[in-house]
Amino acid sequence: MQYVTVHKAYLERVLGSIADGEPIEPMESDTFSAPDLLSIAGACFFAIIRKGQPLGQPDLTPEQQQAERAQHEADLAAAIIFTAQVYDVLSGGEYDVAWEEKMRCRVAAPQATEQFKPIVDPYEGWKTES
C-alpha cells in the first residue's frame, strides 16, 4: 500500500507544465520528493490515457466498452511498469547488455494473475530475451 499526498495547486502546476511543454519543478525544494514524483507519474499517466483513449465502438455494449477502457488503462500501467524496469536496468549500467540504443516493444497487462507482471513482446533492438 502506498500513501499519497495531494496538493491541488501542485497538481495544477504539473498539468500546466505538461500542457505547455515546460519543465516540471519540484513542489517545495530544489529536489523532487517521493510525493512530487508520484504526483508527476500520475499526471503523466492521466495525460497518456487522455491522448490514447480508445474510441467507443458503437457495436459494443456499454459494459464491453468499459471493459475495453479498463484493459487499455491496465495495458498503459503495464507499459509504465516495464519502462520503470528499463530505467532500473539503465541506472545499473546494464542497458547496453540488453538492448540497442533504440529499443521498441509492445507491452500488455495480463488478463488476471496473482502477481502482476507486464507481458513484453520485443520487436526491435533487443540483445537478450526478456
Image (cartoon, helix red, strand yellow):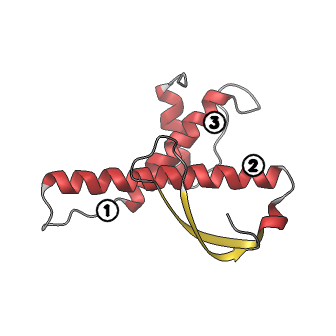
Q: Residues within 10 Å of mark 2 (few under 14, many from 20)?
A: few
Q: Which residue is the site of mark 3?
A: 37
The amino acid marked with disc number 1 is Pro
Q: Would residue 102 appear left or right of 107 to someone viewing this image?
A: right
Compare residues 30 and 86 and report the one nearer the observer.
Answer: 86
On screen, residue 70 versus residue 32, left or right, reads left
Residue 119 in the figure: left or right of residue 102: left
Q: Position of residue 58 (x, y in %)?
A: 13, 66
Q: Secondary structure at mark 1?
A: loop
- Kind of residue at badge 3: Leu
Callout 3 secondary element? helix
Dot in front, 1 or 2: 2
Q: Quadrant of residue 69?
A: bottom left
Q: Residue shown at 63%/36% (left/top)?
A: 37
Secondary element at tag 2: helix
Q: Measure the C-alpha gap from mark 3 to mark 2.
A: 16 Å
The reply to whether residue 20 is visible in this rendering is: no
Asked whether residue 80 appears in the rendered view, the answer is yes
Which amino acid type is marked by label 2?
Asp
